[in-house]
Structures are given as structure tokens and as C-alpha cells.
Image (tube, rainbow, N blue to C red):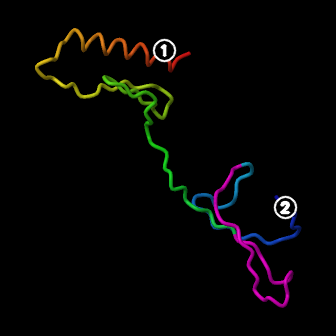
């Protein structure tokens, strides 16, 4: 990695949400050097930063546990929400085995999530 410090440079920014860059905040984007006239390097140059939008948008309530009977999602306030998966009721369905399966899976999920 080659390092260089450029003193007294003009920087033009094109940001998505902020009017000015905030101290300590990281921005993803493209930085390029613009030359207005190639004969006069230092007098007619500036740098331009274009902030790019991240292609990965964070899910609103991400899954933190996915099981056979239940899923648990984390809410924006940090709380956990229990969601039941669809029940497959068929000729082999037993209420007792379903309830025991849900209880065991819930115990496993909470034991892993809350330490």
C-alpha cells in the first residue's frame, strides 16, 4: 500500500443524505482527481467524491433463529419476536408431539440467544 498526503486540495462532495461530511462517519463511494487543464497540474485540479448507495439494504426485522416450528426475529428496538411457522396438519399430525416440539425448539432458541 502506498500512502500519500495531499495538502491544500479542493474537494467537492456529492452525498446521498448529508449536506456536509460528518466527522467520524464513514462514507462509501468513488474519489477521483479532476484536471481542468492538463498543462497546469496544480492550479486547475480538484478532487470529487461521489457517495454510492449500498446495494445491500439491511432487513427491517432480521431472523435470529429459524427452526422447524418457530422463527425468532429481532425488532428495531432490540426486542425479540416469536413467530410460528405454518402447521402441516395431516393424517400423522399429533397435538402432543407438536406442542413438545415447539417447547423444545423454543427452549433451544432462547438458551442460544440469551446468555
Residue 95 in which image quadrant: top left
Residue 14 in which image quadrant: bottom right
Residue 68 at x, y percent in the picture: 32, 24
Q: What number is the disc on residue 53?
A: none
Q: Secondary structure at mark 2?
A: loop
Is residue 68 placed above or below 46 in the rendered structure?
above
Q: Secondary structure at mark 1?
A: helix
Q: Marks 1 and 2, Cα distance to the nearest angstrom?
A: 48 Å
- Along the line of sight, which residue is nearer the eye, 115 or 67? 67
Residues at discs 1 and 2 in contact (Cβ within 8 Å): no
> Would you name the residue on which mark 2 appears?
2
> Would you name the residue on which mark 1 appears?
111
Is residue 9 placed above or below 37 in the rendered structure?
above
- Along the line of sight, which residue is nearer the eye, 95 or 53? 95
The residue shown at (85%, 88%) is 40
Tell me if 38 is positioned left or right of 95 in this view: right
Residue 104 at x, y percent in the picture: 36, 12
The residue shown at (71%, 72%) is 32
- Number of marks: 2
Residue 83 at x, y percent in the picture: 33, 26
Residue 43 at x, y percent in the picture: 85, 83
The residue shown at (41%, 13%) is 107
Residue interval drawn in magenta: 25-48
| Upstream in sequence: badge 1 or badge 2 | 2
Tell me if 72 is positioned left or right of 4 in this view: left
Amino acid at each position: 500500500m502506498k500512502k500519500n498526503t495531499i495538502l491544500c486540495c479542493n474537494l467537492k462532495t456529492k452525498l446521498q443524505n448529508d449536506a456536509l461530511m460528518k466527522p467520524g462517519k464513514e462514507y462509501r463511494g468513488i474519489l477521483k482527481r479532476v484536471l481542468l487543464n492538463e498543462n497546469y497540474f496544480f492550479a486547475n485540479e480538484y478532487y470529487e467524491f461521489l457517495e454510492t448507495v449500498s446495494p445491500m439494504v439491511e432487513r427491517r426485522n432480521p431472523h435470529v433463529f429459524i427452526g422447524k416450528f418457530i422463527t425468532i426475529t429481532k425488532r428495531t428496538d432490540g426486542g425479540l419476536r416469536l413467530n410460528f411457522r405454518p402447521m402441516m396438519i395431516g393424517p400423522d399430525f399429533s397435538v402432543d408431539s407438536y406442542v413438545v416440539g415447539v417447547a423444545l425448539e423454543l427452549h433451544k432458541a432462547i438458551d442460544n440467544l440469551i446468555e
